[in-house]
Image (tube, helix red, strand yellow):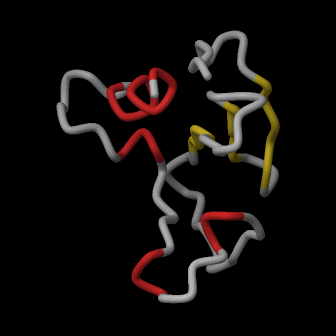
Amino acid sequence: MRAVDRSVAEHYTWDRSCDAWTRVPGSDMLIVEEEMPPQAEEQAHSHQGRAYSATLPDHVLNVNAMHMSAFADEPDDFVLGCAAA
Protein backbone atom coordinates (compact mmCIF):
# COMPACT_ATOMS: atom_id res chain seq x y z
CA MET A 1 0.00 0.00 0.00
CA ARG A 2 1.45 3.35 -1.06
CA ALA A 3 0.20 6.88 -0.55
CA VAL A 4 -0.41 8.74 -3.78
CA ASP A 5 0.34 12.39 -4.28
CA ARG A 6 -2.68 14.64 -3.95
CA SER A 7 -2.19 15.89 -7.53
CA VAL A 8 -3.02 12.42 -8.90
CA ALA A 9 -5.28 11.07 -6.12
CA GLU A 10 -8.97 10.35 -6.67
CA HIS A 11 -10.77 13.61 -5.89
CA TYR A 12 -14.35 14.38 -4.94
CA THR A 13 -16.25 17.39 -3.65
CA TRP A 14 -18.65 17.27 -0.72
CA ASP A 15 -21.00 19.83 0.78
CA ARG A 16 -20.60 22.02 -2.35
CA SER A 17 -17.32 23.66 -1.30
CA CYS A 18 -15.21 21.01 0.42
CA ASP A 19 -12.66 18.77 -1.30
CA ALA A 20 -11.35 15.32 -0.53
CA TRP A 21 -8.63 13.12 -1.98
CA THR A 22 -8.21 9.36 -1.48
CA ARG A 23 -4.52 9.17 -0.56
CA VAL A 24 -4.13 5.38 -0.15
CA PRO A 25 -6.34 3.73 -2.79
CA GLY A 26 -7.07 0.02 -2.98
CA SER A 27 -6.09 -0.78 0.60
CA ASP A 28 -8.09 -2.22 3.47
CA MET A 29 -7.67 1.15 5.18
CA LEU A 30 -9.29 4.34 3.92
CA ILE A 31 -7.11 7.43 4.21
CA VAL A 32 -8.75 10.56 2.88
CA GLU A 33 -7.33 14.06 2.97
CA GLU A 34 -10.04 16.69 3.29
CA GLU A 35 -9.91 20.43 2.81
CA MET A 36 -12.60 22.80 4.00
CA PRO A 37 -12.72 26.53 3.28
CA PRO A 38 -12.76 28.79 6.37
CA GLN A 39 -16.51 29.47 6.14
CA ALA A 40 -17.42 25.77 5.93
CA GLU A 41 -18.72 23.90 8.97
CA GLU A 42 -18.68 20.16 9.29
CA GLN A 43 -21.91 18.59 10.51
CA ALA A 44 -21.81 15.71 12.95
CA HIS A 45 -22.13 12.48 11.00
CA SER A 46 -20.95 8.88 11.00
CA HIS A 47 -19.54 6.53 8.41
CA GLN A 48 -19.76 2.81 7.91
CA GLY A 49 -16.73 0.55 7.84
CA ARG A 50 -14.08 -1.15 9.93
CA ALA A 51 -12.97 1.98 11.80
CA TYR A 52 -16.53 2.55 12.96
CA SER A 53 -17.26 -1.02 14.00
CA ALA A 54 -15.44 -0.82 17.34
CA THR A 55 -17.53 -1.89 20.30
CA LEU A 56 -16.05 0.80 22.56
CA PRO A 57 -16.62 4.43 21.53
CA ASP A 58 -13.07 5.35 22.62
CA HIS A 59 -11.66 3.02 19.95
CA VAL A 60 -13.29 4.81 17.00
CA LEU A 61 -10.83 6.96 15.06
CA ASN A 62 -12.35 9.81 13.05
CA VAL A 63 -9.57 12.34 12.51
CA ASN A 64 -8.22 14.02 9.42
CA ALA A 65 -5.01 12.08 8.67
CA MET A 66 -3.26 15.31 7.77
CA HIS A 67 -3.73 16.42 11.39
CA MET A 68 -2.10 13.31 12.82
CA SER A 69 1.52 13.99 11.85
CA ALA A 70 4.04 13.90 14.67
CA PHE A 71 6.02 16.65 12.94
CA ALA A 72 4.61 20.08 12.04
CA ASP A 73 7.02 20.44 9.13
CA GLU A 74 6.12 16.99 7.70
CA PRO A 75 2.31 17.02 7.29
CA ASP A 76 2.31 13.76 5.24
CA ASP A 77 4.19 11.83 7.94
CA PHE A 78 1.21 9.78 9.17
CA VAL A 79 -0.18 9.08 5.69
CA LEU A 80 3.23 8.01 4.37
CA GLY A 81 3.87 5.90 7.44
CA CYS A 82 0.60 4.03 6.94
CA ALA A 83 1.41 3.51 3.29
CA ALA A 84 4.79 2.01 4.17
CA ALA A 85 3.25 -0.48 6.62
Rendering coords of residue 80 (x, y %): 43, 23
Q: Which residue is outermost to the bottom?
A: 56
- How many numbered circles are shown? 0
On screen, residue 13 versus residue 21, left or right, reads right
Q: Is residue 42 left or right of residue 46?
A: left
Residue 60, placed above or below residue 6:
below
In front of the other: 37 or 85: 85
Q: Position of residue 43 (x, y in %)?
A: 64, 75
Query: 20 and 30: which one is in front?
Result: 30
Task: State the quadrant of the N terminus.
Answer: top right
Q: Is residue 85 left or right of residue 46?
A: left
Place of residue 21 in the rendered image (x, y in percent of width and height, measured from the top left): 68, 32
The part of the image, by quadrant, that contains residue 40 is: bottom right
Residue 70 place in picture, x, y as percent: 20, 38
Q: Is residue 27 left or right of residue 44?
A: right
Q: Is residue 43 above or below residue 24?
A: below
Q: Residue at x 74, y 65 (%)?
A: 49
Residue under the image location 59 percent in, 13 percent down: 5
In the displayed structure, would residue 33 be above or below residue 53? above
Q: Is residue 4 above or below residue 49?
A: above
**In front of the other: 51 or 15:** 51
Residue displayed at 58% across by 66% down: 41
Residue 42 quadrant: bottom right
The residue positioned farthest toward the front in the image shown: 85
